[in-house]
Image (cartoon, rainbow, N blue to C red):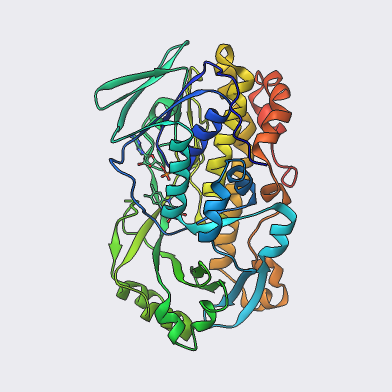
């Protein structure tokens, strides 16, 4: 499936702001199509940050198109047959089988965010993408003919700018015409990643880390706890989503004492409490930011597009944030090729039209699962265990963003004069 053949140069100059998964994917996909790409990233150096992240089959197929990437990712990803779902007291409710999804839709890649990011980042460098670290973009501008940014006092000009600058995006201001501040979602997540050796020593927790990987969710009132082992049980990660009204600072480096999580999980399944006992102190405490869906992701002159979390932050219960960020990049690669240098604005508008309703539908799955998981009617859940499984289906997972954009580009462009109709055209069938 992977091919390293380089198409002829298109002459389209793409500036990407941010080297997260949205920015890197857009850059790699644009490079694959022969566009000239420059990435500006504010981090001064690459760091292995974060913990567990999930890429479902709809983005797994994008990794698979990048020569050598699957072979590097395969040894470091989580491999279990499914997600065991339990009550907070430890009673098993059901098991959602991943194998069935994998066979039907393709390979998923779940692993350490920093480790996966490092592989993708180096792939981008290896294929010759110009990535400049330590470039913080402060300003965006556009005319009918060009778009650009200012970073570290330097001006960079291209045909199109892709603002992949995450949940606190600066690119939003030029797109929306006002500064859009994130709000608290009312939830925060304790998170951690550590070596599983201590868990292997205790018979009550050893099942999670021996004889392969395991994945288990415990559901409680307005709280859920998910644990996974990775690399054949060697590494271990857990996340605990809980109520939190404190503030809206979202940082991957803010810490909380383990004691805070112990308090929140008091009285839970002894297995959960033993996992906590084996967890190094402190935890990451990630405040979950919420944003209303944006009315648009593209600038007035249609030369700047928001992509990834900058356009559409996801709740973790969707397990789709990173996948949808990657789909944006694959779609843009196609749109900019089909539009070419003379029709960049049309390509940018088509990108938004192709993606908007699908992303919204994917976001809603996360809201639905969060609400279901935090307000479980235990009697009903036991009668109908299907009701508490993650809301995933063929429309979401068995989707090839590149192929979809190729097949639908022309009719999307033909309908751009009618914004409501063109978005409705791409509302997923399951939702229509
Ligand atoms: C350090 C870090 C750790 C994370 N860890 C996890 C995790 O463990 N699990 C998980 O599910 N998700 C994690 N995420 C979020 C996850 O990567 C995203 O939700 C998802 O992959 C979508 O990616 P994105 O590229 O849109 O946004 P991000 O991954 O947030 O990437 C945005 C990038 O833009 C850069 N940037 C921001 N502002 C500017 C600017 N003005 N100029 C230049 N560059 C700028 C940022 O430094 C960052 O590299 C993490 C994100 C970050 C930044």
Tell me if I can see residue 367 in this picture: no
Tell me if I can see residue 368 in this picture: yes
The image shows residue 413 at horizontal and vertical percentages of 67, 20
The image shows residue 332 at horizontal and vertical percentages of 57, 29
Q: Is residue 377 above or below residue 126?
A: below
Q: Which quadrant does the N terminus fall into?
A: top right
Q: Which quadrant does the C terminus fall into?
A: top right
Q: Which residue is at a point 59% across and 50% down the rendered structure image?
A: 364
Q: Is residue 348 above or below residue 322?
A: above
Q: Is residue 308 left or right of residue 258?
A: right
Residue 254 or residue 38, whichever sits in front: 38
Q: Which residue is at a point 66% across and 31% down the rendered structure image?
A: 423
Q: Quadrant of residue 166?
A: top left
Residue 108 or residue 281, whichever sits in front: 108
| Residue at the far bottom in the pictured view | 203
Q: How many marks?
A: 0
Q: Is residue 424 left or right of residue 246?
A: right
The image shows residue 337 at horizontal and vertical percentages of 61, 22
Residue 30 or residue 168, whichever sits in front: 30
| Residue at the far left in the pictured view | 153
Q: Is residue 15 left or right of residue 8?
A: left
Ligand 1 is found in which quarter of the picture? top left
Residue 394 or residue 11, whichever sits in front: 11
Q: Is residue 133 left or right of residue 396?
A: left
Q: Which residue is at a point 43% across and 79% down the rendered structure image?
A: 275
Q: Is residue 91 above or below residue 182?
A: below
The image shows residue 193 at horizontal and vertical percentages of 40, 66
Q: Quadrant of residue 340?
A: top right
């Amino acid at each position: 499936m992977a091919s390293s053949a380089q198409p002829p140069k298109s002459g389209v100059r793409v500036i990407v702001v941010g080297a997260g998964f949205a920015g890197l994917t857009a850059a790699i996909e644009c490079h694959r199509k022969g566009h000239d790409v420059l990435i500006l990233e504010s981090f001064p150096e690459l760091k292995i940050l974060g913990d567990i992240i999930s890429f479902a089959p709809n983005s797994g197929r994008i990794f698979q198109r990048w020569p050598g990437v699957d072979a590097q990712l395969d040894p470091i990803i989580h491999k279990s047959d499914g997600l065991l779902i339990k009550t907070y007291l430890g009673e098993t409710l059901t098991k959602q089988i991943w194998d069935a999804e994998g066979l039907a839709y393709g390979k998923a890649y779940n692993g350490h965010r920093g480790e996966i990011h490092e592989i993708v980042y180096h792939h981008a460098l290896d294929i010759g993408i110009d990535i400049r670290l330590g470039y913080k973009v402060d300003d965006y501008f556009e005319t009918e003919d060009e778009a650009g940014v200012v970073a570290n006092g330097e001006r960079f000009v291209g045909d199109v700018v892709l603002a992949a600058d995450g949940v606190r995006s600066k690119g939003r201001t030029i797109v929306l015409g006002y500064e859009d501040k994130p709000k608290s979602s009312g939830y925060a997540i304790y998170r951690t990643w550590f070596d599983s050796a201590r868990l292997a020593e205790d018979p009550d927790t050893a099942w999670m880390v021996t004889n392969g990987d395991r994945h288990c969710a415990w559901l409680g009132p307005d709280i859920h706890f998910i644990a996974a082992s990775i690399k054949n049980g060697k590494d271990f990660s857990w996340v605990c989503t809980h109520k939190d009204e404190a503030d809206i600072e979202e940082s991957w480096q803010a810490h909380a004492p383990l004691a805070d999580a112990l308090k929140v999980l008091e009285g839970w399944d002894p297995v959960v409490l033993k996992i906590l006992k084996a967890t190094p102190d402190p935890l990451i405490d990630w405040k979950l930011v919420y944003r209303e869906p944006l009315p648009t992701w593209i600038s007035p002159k249609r030369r700047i597009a928001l992509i990834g979390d900058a356009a559409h932050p996801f709740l973790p219960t969707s397990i789709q944030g990173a996948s949808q960020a990657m789909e944006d990049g694959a779609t843009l690669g196609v749109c900019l090729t089909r539009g070419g240098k003379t029709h960049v604005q049309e390509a940018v508008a088509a990108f938004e039209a192709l993606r908007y309703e699908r992303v919204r539908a994917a976001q809603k799955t996360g809201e639905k699962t969060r609400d279901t998981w935090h307000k479980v009617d235990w009697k009903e859940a036991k009668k109908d265990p299907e009701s508490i499984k993650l809301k995933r289906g063929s429309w979401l997972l068995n989707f090839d963003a590149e192929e979809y954009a190729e097949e639908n580009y022309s009719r999307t462009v033909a309908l751009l004069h009618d914004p409501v109709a063109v978005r409705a055209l791409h509302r997923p069938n399951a939702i229509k």
